Amino acid sequence: MTRSLVLSVLIIATSFGSVRGQRRWERLPAPRDPQFYEPRNKLEDLDGRMETILIKGRTWVGTIRALNGTARVEALEIRDTAAAARATGVIITIMATGGPPGDIRSLIDYEEIDPLVKAIDSAGKAGDSTTQLTHFEVRYRTRGDFEIMVFKQLSDNAIAAAIEGGFFDRSRLLLTLDELTKLRWMIVQAKEKIDEIK
């Protein structure tokens, strides 16, 4: 009787361990504090500074209203008064319905604007000749994790676009090619606003 009791306890303990091991969410590492991540561009570096006076200037350029949310484009300047440092660029704020709560911001340095505009132009020309396979996807991502995509939809074979932003939480807006062209125009307008204050 003692042997069967010990054997039963041993079997239950062994099975409990394997069941407990299947609880994946408890094995994942805890999320890290955003302060431990290195800034990826000049704007993020200045925006994340502490114990200094930062002066931020913005000029609203426009807002794209997409199928599943909006994207706001603004010209941005950040100055650190103590270090006499300055960075300029574009901030794109994505507010997607059904996405993460709140706004998702992507900071794009001034030096990244021209390559982004060229990438939008190239991606906008994508079509059936892009690849010999039946579907395609063309992507470009900035250092600040703002991403543009042009792709052939699986459902109706139409060519569509999307933008995505965020680091911890990502939001995606689905766009038409015309809306992507409007976004490109807004980014160029933001660059011109920055050029006026240089």
Image (cartoon, helix red, strand yellow):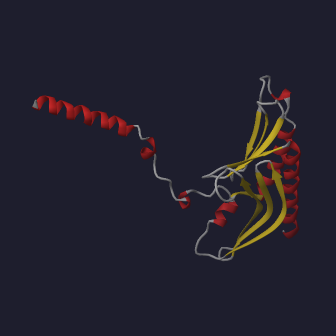
- Measuring from the top left, give residue 180's x and y in whole percent: 84, 47
Residue at figure coordinates x 76%, y 52% from the top left: 69
- Measuring from the top left, give residue 100's x and y in whole percent: 64, 53
* 92 left or right of 31 in image: right
Residue 7: quadrant of the picture: top left
Residue at figure coordinates x 86%, y 40% from the top left: 124
Q: Is residue 122 above or below residue 64?
A: above
Q: Is residue 6 above or below residue 43?
A: above
Residue at figure coordinates x 72%, y 56% from the top left: 95
Q: Is residue 198 above or below residue 69?
A: below
- Measuring from the top left, give residue 8's x and y in whole percent: 20, 31
* Residue ranking furthest to the top: 132
- Measuring from the top left, give residue 185's x and y in whole percent: 89, 53
Residue 86: quadrant of the picture: bottom right
* 18 left or right of 190 in image: left
* Residue ranking furthest to the left: 2
Position of the N terminus, as image quadrant, is: top left
Position of the C terminus, as image quadrant, is: bottom right
The count of marks equals 0
**Front residue (pair 26, 134):** 26
